[in-house]
Image (cartoon, helix red, strand yellow):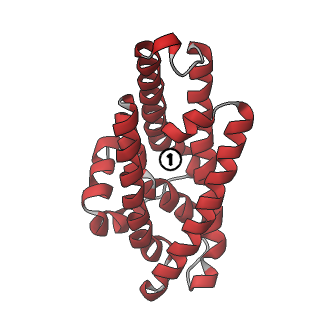
Amino acid sequence: MTLVDRVRNICVSPNTEWPVIAQERTEPATLVTSYLLPLAAIGAVASFIGSSMLRAVLPFGGLGGGIISGLIGACVSILLTIIGCYVIAFIINALAPTFGGRSDFNQAFKTSVYSYTPGLAAGVLLIIPVLGWLVAMIAGLYGLYLLYLGLPVMMQSPKEKAVGYTVIVVVASIVLWFVVTMIMAVLGFAGMMMRG
């Protein structure tokens, strides 16, 4: 299945796509190189181009920073997206028994990555900074719904526990986002994180 087909299927028909994903034997490293990395790179490059264009039209050079810092920011954003998916997968996996599910890191990683698909796919719109950021936020909310649908299928937890499982994973993810934002701020790339 191509990357475009998977993005379309998980976003448009998640109820039929999650069982397909659950049956696939995809190692995390393969999923990173064939799916997560390309999607994360699209958003990072679009954000870099969008912010560069914004700097070009604003008086006095706009938001500051040059090409090198923008490229470094894009690379850091990609790296932190990948790390974030691994950390969220660890959270999903660790919580599975608590919510009546089965621990399986590969399944947890697929759940983490594919739930993040709408936000990653919307990253292409970051070429238009404000609009892209808003659309990515809305797409991220849809990703939470995908997580809710995917947890019972992927981690074999009872459907009646999916809401609690999802909420705990989301709260842990929000805490993770704040930590990542602080790391980016210390490194000088907080604006990059806020854009995507």
**Depth check: 195 or 151 in front?**
195
| Image location of residue 149, percent across then percent down | 39, 71
Q: Is residue 101 left or right of residue 6?
A: right
Q: As shown in the figure, which amino acid type bears the numbered disc 1?
A: Leu
Q: Is residue 29 left or right of residue 184?
A: left
The image quarter in which residue 108 lies: bottom right
Give above or below for 6 relative to 72: below
| Image location of residue 175, percent across then percent down | 65, 60
The residue depicted at 57 percent of the width and 83 percent of the height is 99
The residue depicted at 36 percent of the width and 54 percent of the height is 138
Which residue in the structure is indicated by mark 1? 31
Give above or below for 67 relative to 89: above
| Image location of residue 105, percent across then percent down | 61, 63
The residue depicted at 59 percent of the width and 68 percent of the height is 171
Q: Is residue 65 left or right of residue 133?
A: right
Could you classify mark 1 by the number of other residues whose Cα lies within 10 Å: few (under 14), some (14-19), or many (20 or more)?
some
Number of callouts: 1
- Residue at far front of view: 59
- Residue at far right of view: 186
**Depth check: 47 or 110 in front?**
47
Give above or below for 122 relative to 45: below
**Depth check: 103 or 171 in front?**
171
| Badge 1 element | helix
The residue depicted at 56 percent of the width and 28 percent of the height is 74
**Residue 140 can be seen in this image:** yes
**Depth check: 98 or 167 in front?**
167
**Residue 121 can be seen in this image:** no
- Residue at far left of view: 12
| Image location of residue 45, percent across then percent down | 46, 26
